[in-house]
Each structure stands twice: as structure tokens, then as C-alpha cells.
Image: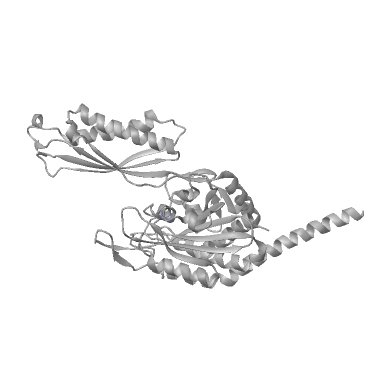
């Protein structure tokens, strides 16, 4: 009899204390939301292109310094450019325990905003080629930065509930795939504590605001850019027998490249080979000297990527040789620095997902399929040696997501001039989810 009374009383108390904790986190976010919204709108109205994030980085660094973090600025060394890297590393040591790195991106895109929101960006600047471009946070990195700062604030206030070292990292040049590597090249993990876990958030237009999503395992592909110059021997369009026509060779190469994924690659290893650009020739009756191709290659696994790059080289050189192009005019293939794949360490993301389910409710945590888009966050895992994960953050009006699913109505995606995340609920969920994530990984 006594036992029967005690058990429900304990359960009721446990439920109450969970609610109290939840309430207090929600109450803290409620208290901060007006200030978070004004930070978001200010960041949204002042976007900066990749490698030019000077003011954005200074703002983020200043806010973290005010919160008591030890902040170092201008971390990063780019390859092949003298540009300053505006990486920010903020460290808060709070007793023994794991080191958790949380990343936000700092950069925006050369897109002319057409959302019509009152805080829309009017910013124009000259790009590296000297051409005037508009600038917009069309990938939602302003949402990430604001949520990141909101989380940093809550975690400084909740220091009694966690123990370990927190690293808040502002990464430049995500959109160009250079920033993560630039920071690692600048001895990120020797000059600062090496993390035991790395996490980041990315907004997801296809997911309703108020929800978070997760994708265990490979979530995003590696991306490799390749330039191919096919050198023929030009001449008069009426006398093909005196030439080696690079346009015909290019056409054969484009078709032959399609067999890499369809015939050489295992169907169980997702891969894409896309020829996104082909340029050659000037007019009707001239066979040109050269044709230039630009390709993107996407894979999850590094060995698949290497095999595909070798196949491209073999096919390009083989087709040119078959066409009789002499050795000294063999095609030139340049592989640019790309980005690695994003692997969400399954144990880590499942652990966070169950903490999210408790905090946000079962229906607000959604398992999502992987995609072949890419992102350079994976580099922070040092080739999967450090458990790392991206958390998807729902960003769109639920009614619009529903209409999109049911009728195919337009739902502006990332990098669209019309991409307009719903700020308030998205920021509330972003701050709550990432605060919960850090508390879960560093709880006392
Ligand atoms: Zn982007
Ligand atoms: Zn992005």
C-alpha cells in the first residue's frame, strides 16, 4: 500500500522537475527573443561575401567576448590567396570534461534578395573579378549565427549544469568550401583544445519551423570541381580533314563520362558526375583550337571519389588519343580544392536526437534522407576521427511546407533570392536544440 503511493509520487515529482527545467530554458529564450530577433535582422541586412566577413566576424567575436569567452580572431590560412581569414575561436573552460566545438558559418552569397521582407539586404559590392554583385544571406547563415550567440549566452548562464570546455567557432568562407580547411591549416587543433565532439546547425527550408531534423551516417557528399581543357587543332569548317576537331572530341568525352557512374561505380555507392559548363568556338565556319569543360563530382566515400577522378582522366585522355590528337596537345585536367563529405557520426546524432525528442517532443524531431549537396563542416572531424554532426533546423512556415508537399507549390530553397526563413520560431528552436545538445554532451 505504502509502495503504491510512493511510486506515483516519485513519478509525479520527476515529471514536475523535467517540466521545470524545460520551462526555465523556454523562459530564458522568451526573455532573449526580442534581442535575438534584432541581432538576426541586423546580420541579415549586412551580409558579407566569403573571405570578406570582416565586420560579421568582429561582431560575433565582440558578443562572445562580452559573455566571458576567451576570443581569438583572424584564425585561418587560405591556400593560393593572400586574403585574411576572419575565423573566430572562442573558448570557455568550465571544469573537467569533454571539449565540444560548435560551429557557425559567417559568410553570405552573391544573390540579389527578392524576399520583400522589411529587413531585406540592399548590400552591393564588387566581387573578386571587379564586377558589382548584390549580397544576401541566402543560405541562412545569419540564422545560424544568431542561434549560436543565443546558445552561447544561455550556456554561460547555465554553467552549473555542465562541465568541460566549450569552443564556439565562427567559420569564414563556407560557401566557397575553403574556410574549415583554412582554420585547420592554421593549427586550430594545436593552438586550441582539440574537440571530442563537433556540432553545427544548418537551416532546412523543406522542414517546418519548430522542428529539427537529423541524418545518421553520410548526410552530404564531397564536391570536387574539375577543369578540362581539350586542345585540338583548329582550321576551316569546310576542311575538317586538316584539323583535330575539339568540339567533336568534347561531345564524345561528355557522353563517355556518363558511363563512370552507370557502368564503373557500384549502385550502392551514390555518385554524381555533372558537366556543368562547356565552352568552345567563335562562329559557324571555324573549327576552334580548344574547348573547355567544367565538372562537379559528388560522392560520399573518399575511395569512390579517387576512383572517379582516375576514370575521368583515363576517359578524357583516351578519347583525345583515339581522335588522333597528338601527345603534346593532350587534354589538361585540373582538379581544384573541393570539400569533403559530411558524415554524421551515428552514435552522436542518435544521442542528440533522443535528447531533442525529450525537449522538443517526438513529432518535432524528424529523421531525414541524405543529399548530394556539400558543405565543408566534415573537415572538422579530421576524416571521421572526431565524432561530428550537423543538425537540420526547420525554417519554413508549416502551411507552405504542406502546400509544397501536397501540390508542389514553390518553396524557395537555400541560395534562392526568395529564401526567407521564419525568424522567430526558427531561432527559438535553434537556440533550444543547440543548448540541449551541449548540455547533453557535457552534463555533470
Ligand atoms: Zn550555402
Ligand atoms: Zn549554408
- Residue 337 percent coordinates (x, y): 35, 47
Q: Quadrant of the C terminus?
A: bottom right
- Residue 120 shows up from this direction: no
Q: Is residue 377 above or below residue 154?
A: above
* Left or right: residue 356 compared with residue 421: right
Q: Is residue 17 above or below residue 389?
A: below
* Left or right: residue 374 compared with residue 150: left
Give 122 or 342, whichever is nearer the viewer.
342
Give 301 or 93, whichever is nearer the viewer.
93
- Residue 210 percent coordinates (x, y): 56, 58
- Residue 417 shows up from this direction: yes
Give 272 or 50, whichever is nearer the viewer.
50
Give 168 or 431, whichever is nearer the viewer.
168
- Residue 209 percent coordinates (x, y): 53, 58
Q: Is residue 337 above or below residue 145?
A: above
Q: Residue at x 42, y 66 (%)?
A: 57
Q: Residue at x 40, y 54 (%)?
A: 182
Amino acid at each position: 500500500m505504502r509502495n503504491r503511493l510512493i511510486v506515483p509520487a516519485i513519478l509525479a515529482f520527476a515529471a514536475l522537475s523535467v517540466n521545470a527545467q524545460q520551462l526555465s530554458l523556454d523562459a530564458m529564450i522568451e526573455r532573449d527573443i526580442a534581442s535575438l530577433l534584432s541581432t538576426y535582422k541586423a546580420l541579415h541586412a549586412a551580409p558579407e561575401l566569403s573571405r570578406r566577413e570582416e565586420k560579421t566576424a568582429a561582431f560575433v567575436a565582440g558578443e562572445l567576448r562580452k559573455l566571458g569567452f576567451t576570443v581569438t580572431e583572424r584564425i585561418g590560412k587560405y591556400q593560393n590567396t593572400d586574403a585574411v581569414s576572419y575565423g573566430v575561436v572562442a573558448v570557455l573552460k568550465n571544469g573537467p570534461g569533454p571539449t565540444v566545438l560548435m560551429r557557425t558559418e559567417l559568410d553570405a552569397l552573391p544573390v540579389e534578395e527578392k524576399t520583400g521582407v522589411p529587413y531585406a539586404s540592399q548590400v552591393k559590392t564588387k566581387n573578386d573579378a571587379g564586377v558589382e554583385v548584390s549580397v544576401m544571406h541566402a543560405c541562412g547563415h545569419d540564422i545560424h549565427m544568431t542561434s549560436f550567440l543565443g546558445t552561447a549566452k544561455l550556456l554561460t548562464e547555465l554553467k552549473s549544469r555542465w562541465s568541460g570546455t566549450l569552443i564556439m567557432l565562427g567559420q569564414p568562407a563556407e560557401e566557397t568550401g575553403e574556410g574549415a580547411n583554412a582554420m585547420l591549416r592554421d593549427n586550430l587543433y594545436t593552438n586550441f583544445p582539440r574537440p571530442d565532439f563537433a556540432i553545427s546547425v544548418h537551416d532546412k527550408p523543406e522542414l517546418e519551423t519548430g522542428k529539427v531534423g537529423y541524418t545518421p551516417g553520410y548526410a552530404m557528399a564531397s564536391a570536387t570541381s574539375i577543369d578540362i581543357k581539350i586542345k585540338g587543332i583548329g582550321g576551316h569548317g569546310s576542311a575538317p580533314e586538316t584539323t583535330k576537331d575539339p568540339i567533336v572530341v568534347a561531345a564524345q568525352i561528355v557522353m563517355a563520362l556518363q558511363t563512370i557512374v552507370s557502368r564503373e561505380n557500384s549502385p550502392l555507392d551514390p555518385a554524381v558526375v555533372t558537366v556543368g559548363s562547356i565552352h568552345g568556338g567563335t562562329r559557324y565556319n571555324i573549327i576552334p583550337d580548344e574547348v573547355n569543360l567544367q565538372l562537379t563530382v559528388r560522392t560520399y566515400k573518399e575511395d569512390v571519389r579517387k576512383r572517379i577522378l582516375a576514370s575521368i582522366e583515363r576517359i578524357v585522355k583516351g578519347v583525345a588519343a583515339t581522335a588522333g590528337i597528338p601527345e603534346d596537345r593532350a587534354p589538361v585536367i585540373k582538379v581544384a580544392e573541393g570539400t569533403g563529405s559530411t558524415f554524421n557520426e551515428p552514435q552522436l546524432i542518435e544521442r542528440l536526437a533522443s535528447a531533442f525528442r525529450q525537449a522538443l517532443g517526438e513529432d518535432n524531431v524528424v529523421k531525414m534522407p541524405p543529399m548530394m549537396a556539400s558543405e565543408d563542416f566534415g573537415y572538422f572531424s579530421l576524416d571521421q576521427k572526431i565524432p561530428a554532426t550537423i543538425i537540420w533546423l526547420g525554417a519554413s512556415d508549416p502551411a507552405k511546407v504542406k502546400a509544397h508537399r501536397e501540390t508542389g507549390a514553390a518553396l524557395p530553397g537555400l541560395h534562392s533570392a526568395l529564401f526567407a526563413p521564419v525568424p522567430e520560431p526558427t531561432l527559438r528552436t535553434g537556440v533550444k536544440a543547440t543548448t540541449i545538445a551541449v548540455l547533453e554532451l557535457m552534463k555533470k
